[in-house]
Image: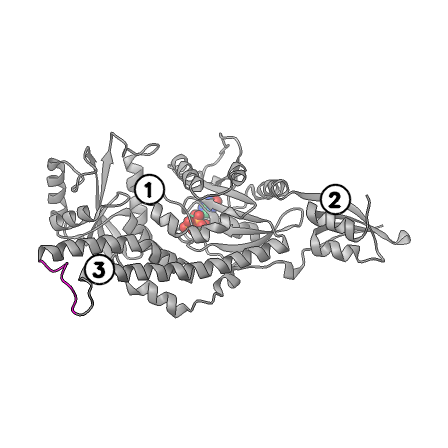
C-alpha cells in the first residue's frame, strides 16, 4: 500500500487582488473625481494641532465604556498617524452644553479661546467630536481665527492620504459629499448676507446656489455610478470564487489591531504591508491560505473600525464591505493589549450589526485575542477568545484548526473516505471538485482509498455521475 500527501496545486493558490484592480473604469476618470473637489482644504503639508476634547459627563451624549483620557489618546493617535502633523498642546474640558454652537459654557469657552490664541505656531484646532455642525465650525473658526477640524474631517484626511485603489478613492469622494454640502450651506449663508446667493446667473434660469447644488448632485451620481460598476466587478469575482468553492474568511476588527499582520502570518503573503498606523488598510483584498486539512481558503483583509465614526462614512465603504456578508466566517481580531480593548470590541460589534450581515454569520464570529506577546502570562477571561500573537506566531496553529472546524460547519463540507476505481476518471473528478487530502493506492485491486473534503452537493453529483451507491 502506498500513502502520499497531496500538496495543493500551484494554480489553486490564487490572489484576487490583482484581478480586483483590473476594472474597466479608467484611472484618470477616478483621479479626476478624487482631485476635483477636496472639501477639507487641509492641504498636504504639515499641521501643528491643538486638540480639544469636550468631556460630556451627563446626558445622552456621554460616552460609555471609555474615559476622556483614552479618547484624547485616540485623537492624538489620529494626528500622529499623519505625516508631518504634530500635537502642540491638548486639553480636556468638561461641558454640559455639547449641543450649543460653541460646545462649552461661557467661562470654559473664554478660557479655551485665550489658551488657543496664546499658543503660538498652531495651524489648526482639532475638536474631538464626531461631527461639528457647519454653524459650529464657522462660529469656532471666527472665534479662534484658525482652521477647526472634527473627527470626521481628520479621519477622511487620513483616508485620503492612504487611498491607493480606485474603489478607495471613490468611496472617500462619496464620504466627502456631506462636507461639501455643509460648506455650500455656509457659503450660501455668507452670500445671502451680501444679498448675492439668490441672484440668477444670466441666461441660465438658475441661481448661483441652485447651480452649485446641481453640480454636487451630478458629482454624487457620477461617483455612485462608478462605484456601482466596480461593485458589479466584485460581484463577478465573488461568483467565480464561489464556483471554485474556496471558502472565504473575513478578518475584521478595530484599526491597528493586527488584521493585516495576522493574514500575512496565516498565508505567508509577502506582499502585505502591516503598518503601525491607523487606517493603513483601506481596500478589501483577498489572500489565499491553506488550512491544516490542506483545503485552500481565502482570507479577506478589511478596513479597520474606529469609535464614533459617522454612519455616512461607513455607508460609503459598504460596497467593499459587501464581501464580508458573503463570506463563510468572520474572524474578529482584538488588540488585547490595548487599554480600550473592551470598548473597541463593543464598537466593532455595533458596526457589524449595522452592516446587513446574515444572522448566522454574526452568531458564529470567531474572536481572536491578538498581541499576547505584549501581555506575558495572558489567559483569556472571556469564553471563546483565542489567544494569539500574529507577530511571534504563538497560537496560530490552534487558530487555523479553529477556523477549519468553523468552516467545515458553516459550508456544510463533508470529510469522506471513498474507494475509487483507478481505471475511471473518479480520482481526477475528485481533485477537481473537492480537496483531496490523502490517497492510498491498492495496486493489486486497481483501487485507491481517497480522503476528500467535498461539499454535499458535489458529492451528490459524484454519486450520480459514477453511479456510486455507498
Ligand atoms: N507586539 C505585537 N504587535 C503586533 C501584533 N500584530 C500586529 N502588530 C503590530 O500592530 C501594528 C498594526 O498592525 P496591522 O496588521 O497593520 O494592523 P491592522 O489591523 O491591519 O490596521 P489597519 O489596517 O490600520 O486597520 C503593526 O505595527 C504591527 O506590527 C502582535 O501580535 N504583537
Ligand atoms: Mg490593515
The region drawn magenta spans 195-202
Q: Is disc 1 placed on a helix, strand or loop?
A: loop
Left or right side of 171 for 104: left
Task: Kindly identify which numbered label has been placed on residue 12.
Answer: none
Task: Kindly identify which numbered label has been placed on residue 416.
Answer: 2
Residue occupying image coordinates x 75% and y 49%: 438
The location of residue 25, given as percent across then percent down, is 44, 67
Left or right side of 398 for 180: left
Residue occupying image coordinates x 54% and y 47%: 327
Residue occupying image coordinates x 23% and y 52%: 182
Return the disc, 3 or 2, that comes first in the chain's sequence: 3
Residue tagged by mark 3?
Answer: 210
Front residue of this view, candidates 470 and 205: 205
Q: Are marks 3 and 2 in contact (CB under 8 Å)?
A: no
Residue tagged by mark 1?
Answer: 308
On screen, 205 above or below 291? Answer: below
The location of residue 4, given as percent across then percent down, is 77, 52
**Distance of label 1 from label 3 (alpha carbons):** 33 Å
- Between circles 1 and 3, the one closer to the viewer is 3
Left or right side of 69 for 135: left
**Distance of label 1 from label 2 (alpha carbons):** 48 Å
Return the disc, 1 or 2, that comes first in the chain's sequence: 1
Amino acid at each position: 500500500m502506498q500513502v502520499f500527501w497531496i500538496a495543493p496545486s500551484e494554480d489553486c493558490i490564487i490572489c484576487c487582488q490583482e484581478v480586483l484592480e483590473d476594472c474597466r473604469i479608467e484611472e484618470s476618470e477616478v483621479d479626476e473625481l478624487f482631485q476635483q473637489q477636496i472639501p477639507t482644504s487641509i492641504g498636504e503639508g504639515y499641521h501643528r494641532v491643538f486638540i480639544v476634547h469636550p468631556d460630556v459627563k451627563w446626558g445622552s451624549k456621554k460616552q460609555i465604556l471609555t474615559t476622556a483620557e483614552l479618547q484624547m489618546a485616540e485623537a492624538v493617535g489620529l494626528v500622529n498617524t499623519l505625516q508631518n502633523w504634530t500635537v502642540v498642546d491638548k486639553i480636556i474640558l468638561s461641558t454640559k452644553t455639547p449641543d450649543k454652537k460653541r460646545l462649552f459654557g461661557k467661562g470654559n469657552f473664554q478660557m479655551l479661546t485665550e489658551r488657543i490664541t496664546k499658543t503660538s505656531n498652531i495651524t489648526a484646532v482639532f475638536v474631538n467630536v464626531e461631527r461639528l455642525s457647519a454653524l459650529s465650525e464657522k462660529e469656532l473658526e471666527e472665534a479662534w481665527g484658525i482652521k477647526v477640524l472634527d473627527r470626521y474631517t481628520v479621519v477622511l484626511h487620513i483616508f485620503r492620504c492612504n487611498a491607493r485603489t480606485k474603489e478607495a478613492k471613490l468611496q472617500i469622494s462619496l464620504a466627502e459629499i456631506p462636507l461639501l454640502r455643509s460648506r455650500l450651506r455656509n457659503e450660501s449663508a455668507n452670500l445671502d448676507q451680501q444679498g448675492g446667493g439668490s441672484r440668477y446667473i444670466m441666461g441660465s434660469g438658475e441661481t448661483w446656489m441652485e447651480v452649485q447644488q446641481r453640480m454636487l448632485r451630478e458629482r454624487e451620481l457620477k461617483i455612485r455610478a462608478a462605484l456601482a460598476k466596480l461593485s458589479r466587478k466584485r460581484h463577478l469575482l465573488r461568483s467565480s470564487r464561489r464556483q471554485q468553492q474556496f471558502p472565504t474568511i473575513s478578518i475584521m476588527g478595530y484599526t491597528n489591531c493586527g488584521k493585516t499582520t495576522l493574514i500575512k502570518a496565516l498565508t505567508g503573503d509577502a506582499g502585505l504591508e502591516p503598518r503601525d498606523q491607523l487606517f493603513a488598510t483601506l481596500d478589501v483584498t483577498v489572500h489565499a491560505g491553506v488550512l491544516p486539512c490542506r483545503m485552500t481558503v481565502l482570507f479577506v483583509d478589511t478596513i479597520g473600525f474606529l469609535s464614533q465614526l459617522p454612519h455616512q462614512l461607513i455607508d460609503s465603504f459598504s460596497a467593499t464591505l459587501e464581501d464580508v456578508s458573503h463570506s463563510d466566517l468572520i474572524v474578529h481580531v482584538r488588540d488585547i493589549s490595548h487599554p480600550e480593548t473592551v470598548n473597541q470590541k463593543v464598537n466593532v460589534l455595533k458596526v457589524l450589526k449595522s452592516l446587513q450581515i446574515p444572522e448566522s454569520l454574526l452568531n458564529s464570529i470567531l474572536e481572536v485575542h491578538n498581541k499576547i506577546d505584549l501581555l506575558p502570562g495572558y489567559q483569556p477571561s472571556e469564553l471563546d477568545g483565542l489567544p494569539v500573537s500574529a507577530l511571534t506566531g504563538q497560537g496560530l496553529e490552534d487558530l487555523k484548526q479553529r477556523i477549519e472546524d468553523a468552516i467545515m460547519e458553516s459550508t456544510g463540507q463533508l470529510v469522506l473516505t471513498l474507494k475509487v476505481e483507478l481505471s475511471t476518471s473518479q480520482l481526477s473528478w475528485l481533485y477537481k471538485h473537492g480537496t483531496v487530502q490523502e490517497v492510498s493506492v491498492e495496486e493489486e485491486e486497481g483501487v485507491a482509498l481517497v480522503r476528500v473534503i467535498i461539499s454535499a452537493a458535489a458529492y451528490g453529483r459524484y454519486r450520480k455521475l459514477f453511479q456510486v451507491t455507498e
